[in-house]
């Protein structure tokens, strides 16, 4: 009897456990279990954070998962030399974050007056729901001074896009030359002498929402003497679906002080025009053989390299299989001839024209056209050719015979 009671209690406990599990999975918190949160510091201003001043830090939290987060919170805990403007502002309640939703919160920190130039760290905690565990991410903020007595001025001397005009899907580089426009080593202002060195404390190239900049912020530590320059390069990525247009990026620089900060709008051109292949003569073969002629034109605004034209057909053999042209300037025209041979008995055969080329370092392969090649018969020339071939064969056969006959009679 006692054994039966033990079995009953075990069964009862099992039922209770199953009920608790079902309750857990059916609770509202289950929606948060499929949420995946990600935090990042997207910007802080000023950059670098100034010693003895406030810095505004923008924290982004995003739900990259498949489920909804019902009660999102973030918490910031700074380390020396940073401190919050008020401890009560450490925790920020965000609320609901659906999949692919994001929120941005601004924190205000003070940089200690005794801080040294370098970097400081902040910890950002986040949770998907009340009672959940807090997760932590750490970020470094650069600390420096934006105030120098130097009077040199940084100007954008030039910039170069490589390639000069992008195509959708391209990767490339934009290179900037920043120069110190001062012409002497010292200048006197209000009776006080200043050096004319210039600084680029930071330089940021910002995308416009369409074109993505892949580089981090440039942080400089040296000076640019009068007449000297510094070269900065940024990698950019053009989306595949981007429309043809001129887009503008922003180059933001911090100079000797905030008075010397500069913003420049940088035009970036995107143009999908490429290589066109146009038949120069009617596409036809006589008695299964002939030469096809095409005009190849580079309609892109800049030079394209490694250009090759390939004709493809299951019923035709081409020579060469790929006609390699090489480099073509914008609006340049090139004529190619390709020999073709077929045994098809049809009246036409389909031919696909494929072009490969490079725009900068970007390889492109496109099908520019599908054409039909007419197969013509020339019975008269064919018969005459056969007749001539027959006579020729007899003549060729008879000559050795005569020679052999004469040799035997000697």
Image (cartoon, helix red, strand yellow):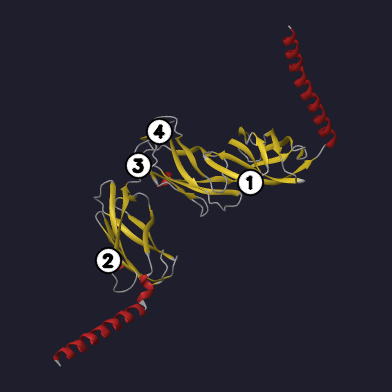
* Residue 67, image x, y percentages: 41, 70
138 lies above or below 249:
below
Secondary structure under badge 3?
loop
Q: Which mark is residue 367?
A: 1
Q: Residue at x 36, y 80 (%)?
A: 26
* Residue 83, image x, y percentages: 27, 59
State left or right for residue 234 relative to residue 57.
right
State left or right for residue 20 relative to residue 158.
left
Name the residue furthest front. Answer: 409
Task: Work out whether residue 186 or residue 250 is closer to the camera in this orientation and state it.
Answer: 250
Residue 70 in view: no
State left or right for residue 114 relative to residue 225.
left
Q: Are marks 3 and 4 in contact (CB under 8 Å)?
A: no
Q: Which mark is residue 148?
A: 3
Q: Nearer the viewer, mark 2 or mark 4?
A: 2
Distance (Cα) linking label 3 and label 2: 33 Å
Q: Nearer the viewer, mark 3 or mark 2?
A: 2
Q: Which residue is mark 4?
A: 187
* Residue 51, image x, y percentages: 30, 50
Name the residue furthest right. Answer: 380
Assign the N terminus to one quadrant of the image.
bottom left
Which is more N-terminal, label 3 or label 1? 3
Task: Work out whether residue 101 or residue 279 is closer to the camera in this orientation and state it.
Answer: 279
Secondary structure under badge 2?
helix
Q: Residue at x 72, y 45 (%)?
A: 349
Q: Which residue is mark 2?
A: 87
Q: Residues within 10 Å of mark 4 (few under 14, many from 20)?
A: some
Name the residue furthest bottom. Answer: 1
Distance (Cα) linking label 1 and label 2: 63 Å
């Amino acid at each position: 009897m006692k054994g039966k009671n033990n079995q009953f209690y075990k069964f009862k406990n099992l039922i209770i456990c199953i009920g608790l599990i079902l309750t857990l999975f059916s609770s509202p918190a289950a929606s948060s279990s499929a949420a995946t949160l990600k935090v990042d510091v997207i910007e802080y201003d000023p950059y670098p954070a100034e010693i003895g001043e406030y810095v505004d830090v923008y924290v982004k939290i995003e739900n990259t998962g498949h489920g909804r987060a019902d009660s999102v919170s973030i918490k910031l805990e700074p380390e020396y030399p940073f401190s919050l403007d008020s401890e009560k502002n450490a925790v920020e309640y965000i609320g609901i974050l659906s999949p692919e939703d994001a929120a941005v919160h601004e924190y205000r920190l003070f940089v200690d007056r005794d801080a040294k130039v370098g970097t400081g760290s902040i910890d950002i905690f986040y949770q998907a729901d009340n009672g959940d565990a807090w997760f932590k991410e750490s970020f470094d903020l650069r600390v420096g001074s934006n105030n120098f007595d130097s009077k040199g001025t940084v100007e954008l001397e030039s910039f170069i896009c490589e390639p000069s005009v992008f195509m959708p899907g391209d990767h490339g580089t934009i290179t900037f030359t920043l120069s110190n426009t001062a012409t002497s080593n010292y200048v006197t202002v209000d009776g006080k002498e200043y050096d004319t060195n210039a600084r680029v404390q930071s330089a940021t190239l910002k995308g416009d929402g369409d074109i993505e900049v892949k580089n981090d912020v440039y942080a400089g530590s040296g000076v640019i003497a009068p007449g000297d320059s510094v070269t900065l390069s940024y990698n950019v990525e053009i989306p595949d679906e981007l429309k043809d247009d001129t887009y503008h990026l922003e180059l933001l620089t911090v100079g000797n002080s905030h008075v010397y900060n500069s913003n420049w709008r940088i035009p970036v051109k995107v143009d999908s025009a490429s290589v066109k292949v146009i038949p120069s003569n009617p596409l036809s073969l006589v008695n299964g053989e002939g030469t096809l002629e095409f005009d190849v034109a580079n309609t892109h605004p800049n030079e394209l390299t490694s250009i090759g034209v390939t004709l493809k057909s299951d019923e035709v053999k081409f020579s060469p299989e790929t006609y390699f042209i090489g480099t073509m300037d914008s609006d340049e025209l090139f004529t190619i001839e390709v020999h073709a041979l077929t045994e098809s008995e049809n009246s036409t055969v389909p031919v696909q024209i494929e072009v490969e080329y490079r725009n900068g370092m970007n390889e492109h392969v496109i099908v520019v056209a599908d054409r039909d090649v007419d197969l013509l018969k020339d019975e008269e020339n064919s018969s005459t050719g056969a007749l001539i071939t027959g006579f020729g064969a007899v003549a060729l056969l008879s000559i050795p015979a005569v020679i052999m006959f004469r040799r035997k009679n000697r």
